[in-house]
Amino acid sequence: MKIVVQLVLWIVIGFLGYLVFNSVNGPVKFNKLKKVRYAQAVENLRDIRTAQLAYRSITGKFTKDPAQLVSFIDTAKFTLTQRRDSSFMSYNKVLKIDEPRDTVVIDTLGYASVKDSLFKTNNHKTMMKIPIEGIDATYDMDAGFINKNDLRIPVFEAKVSKDILLHDQDKDLLAQEKEVVSVDGVNGPFLSVGSMTEVMTSGNWPRTYGANDQ
């Protein structure tokens, strides 16, 4: 009977030791994996932002259509220009004399492929896909206009839920991560760039994951 009691005690001690170890090691493994997956997701969000900014520079707006954005990168061209100061003579009807006037002349020097300028490795082809093994999902993307100070300003947003990025992780740790508020963390339930309510093209990740503005 004594041996049975000892065995039971050893089993209980081992189980409690496992629980203690897991309570410490679980969050460590979670945070390590989280940082790797966030870094992978951020790379694509940065590419999406680069593509959207190029799209706006040529069209004057952003797009919510991923296929249209990829096609744009493949076919669009930047206009290369040069600004130079110049002057001309203008007749003053009041004084009845010719007067010199200053002006700025913009010369078109040529054109440059958007793809060759920004995406030499064709990474724009897969930038909308979540780059995490085992996850078959894409970023949510929206675009439109908001009114600020009587101006109609183009905006866009691309995001992915932490539920998707960390779908196979401990649900309690995931719930805590979605509520995080920290200067060195990704606040809120999404990893995102841009905004549909504010005039901004920055991301919500800390700079440890790469530049969050452009």
Image (tube, rainbow, N blue to C red):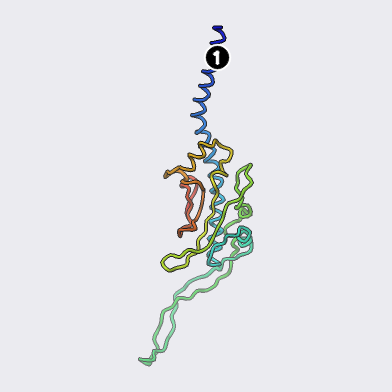
- Say which amino acid is labelled 1: Val
**Residue at 55%, 71% in the rendered image:** 109
Q: In the image as oriented, which residue stretches furthest toward the front? A: 1
Image coordinates for residue 158, horizontal then vertical, percent: 54, 54
Image coordinates for residue 97, horizontal then vertical, percent: 38, 91
The mark tally for this picture is 1
Residue 181 lies, with reference to residue 143, above or below; the image says above
Residue carrying label 1: 8
Looking at the image, residue 2 sits to the left or right of residue 67; the answer is: left
Q: Quadrant of the N terminus?
A: top right
- SS state under label 1: helix
**Residue at 47%, 54% in the rendered image:** 202
**Residue at 41%, 89% in the rendered image:** 91
Near mark 1 (Cα within 10 A), the count class, few <14, some 14-19 or many ≥20, is few
- Towards the viewer: 197 or 131: 197
**Residue at 52%, 41% in the rendered image:** 35
- Towards the viewer: 65 or 126: 65
Question: Residue 78: which quarter of the image?
Answer: bottom right
Image coordinates for residue 54, horizontal then vertical, percent: 55, 62
Residue 64 lies, with reference to residue 43, above or below; the image says below
